Each structure stands twice: as C-alpha cells, then as structure tokens.
Amino acid sequence: MRLVNRPTRLAAWAAAALLVTAVGCAPQDESPGGGSAAGQDKSCDRGKLTTVAAGKLTVGTDKPAYAPWFADDDPANGKGFESAVAFAVAKRLGYGKDAVRWRTVPFNNAFAPGAKTFDFDINQISISASRKQAVAFSSGYYDVRQAVVALKGSKAAKAKSVADLKGVKLGAQVGTTSLDVINDTIRPGTSAAVFQKNDLAKSALKNGQIDALVVDLPTAFYITSAEIKDAEVVGQFRSDGGAAKEQFGLVLDKESRITGCVSAAVDALRKDGTLAALEKKWLTDAVSAPVLK
C-alpha cells in the first residue's frame, strides 16, 4: 500500500475541513450532478466554454485504463464505453476529437479536494454526497451495479445470497463504492482487504489472499472473460432503481463554470438514446448475472 507523507496528509485534511465548512454555508446547488449554479457558463456556446486550456477540452482518467471502459489502455482511441461517452459529451459541447486532450489522473485524486487540471474526469466514479463536498458532478451517465468475482469451485463461488458471503475474505479497491458494498451491505465477519488498485486485488484473488473480489458488474465480466479465466461472476447486488440508485458521473472542479453545460450534454445523450446505444455496444454482457438476495 502506498505510504502517505504525514505533513501533506494533515494539510490535506485541514484543507478538506475548511472546504466542508465553506460548502456548508453555500447555497444549495441546483445542477443535476450537484455542481454549483453560481458562476456557471450560461450560454454553453459550442467550443467556447471556460476550459482549462482555451479551445481545448481536457479529460482526465486513471492509468491503466481498463476494459470494457477503455480499450488497449488508450483513452484517446474512442474505444470502450467511457472513452466513447467522453467523446460524445465533447462533441455535444462543440469540441471535435482533435480538440480533446487526455490527462492521467489517479482515481482517488480525481475527487480529492483542490483545484483540478482537467475539465472533467471519467473513471467509474460514483456520485455521492460525501464526494460532492469536494467536487462537482454531471448528471449520471451510467447506472451502476456491483458484483462479486470468485475462483470457480471455491466456497465464495457457491454463494447464492448476501448472507453466504459473510464468512469469506473479501477485497476491493480503496475509496470505491465496491468497498462500501462490502462494509455496508455484506458486513463480513472478517475486515475487507483494501487495495490501491484493482490490479493488486486481482492478484490477491489469484494468489488466494482473498476469497472474492467486489467490483462493478462490467468490470467483473471483463475480469472473468479476459483476465482470470478460472474465476466466475458469482452474482450482482440488487439495484432498487429508485432515488438512491448508484450512478457514475463526470467529475468537475467544485468551482467549474461548465458543470451545467456538461450535465446538459449528458442529459441530451441519454434522451436521444446515445448512452443506451454505447452501453449496448460496449457493456452488453452486464445483464446476465444472478441477483444476490
């Protein structure tokens, strides 16, 4: 696990505390993903937004960039669901493919307090109240379900319910809603193993250090079909489809002036069927896992 410089960590906590205090006094936001309405770009003129680099749209994501969200660890190639969504949003905003710049941003840094070096980040980041204290979100572009992956024939692979998972050793990436599902929904008898990257969690599963891994459903299918072929998707967790459903959103700086424009672009892509078509093209396998009750 990566070591954290203590003074830097203390400073970050202090900055976060100040930010939370400031947010607590701010007017309630009105944009769909939670961005501040104050100071927003009102016109959303195509290709003329207030961006990090004038005339360009800078998009962040982590490295490696995993399938099926990206392809060949190259976000700029337009392949994979999130790469395609990013370019579709950019096009709606008036930025062609040659005007989109990609920047590597570690997962946890994307929604940490502080100024951002991207116009929006796309990296399977769920919209949550706690994250909204530090960043703004667009409207949700994908409805998320979490799933369990285990080696075939193992005790964890035989689980049919949430209760069946309480006695197995589980793992997930730090700072993810996958880890929240372990702690809040499964509540296992043994504390979850926490990993800095999903790659480390996958290695732990293969080496027998954990019995099962919790990830989002499309990633679970990719792991079992392409990376750990002696593993299987045990099942997915129930999605109630209501107001509390989990969604991925584009992450923007808390003070970004373009949050409303980006949300409007996402809303338009959902309304005209573009998001559904991209989901069908890149995430079609994510419908057949049994629901763990």
Image (cartoon, helix red, strand yellow):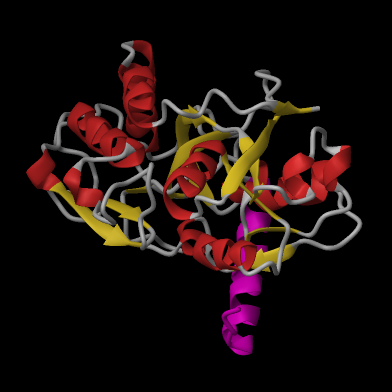
Residue at image location 24% in from the left, 27% down from the top: 43
Q: Point out residue 277 in the picture as x, y percentages from the top left corner.
A: 32, 19
Q: From the image, which quarter does the N terminus lie in?
A: bottom right
Which sits in the foreground, 16 or 83? 83
Q: Point out residue 3 in the picture as x, y percentages from the top left corner.
A: 59, 84
Q: Is residue 104 visible?
A: yes
Which sits in the foreground, 146 or 149? 149
Q: Residue furthest right?
A: 189
Residue at image location 33% in from the left, 54% down from the top: 60
Q: Is residue 25 left or right of residue 49?
A: right
Q: Is residue 13 magenta?
A: yes
Residue at image location 63% in from the left, 62% down from the top: 205
Residue at image location 30% in from the left, 40% down from the top: 80
Q: Main secondary structure of the magenta part?
A: helix
Which sits in the foreground, 112 or 167? 167
Q: Which residues are magenta?
A: 1-25
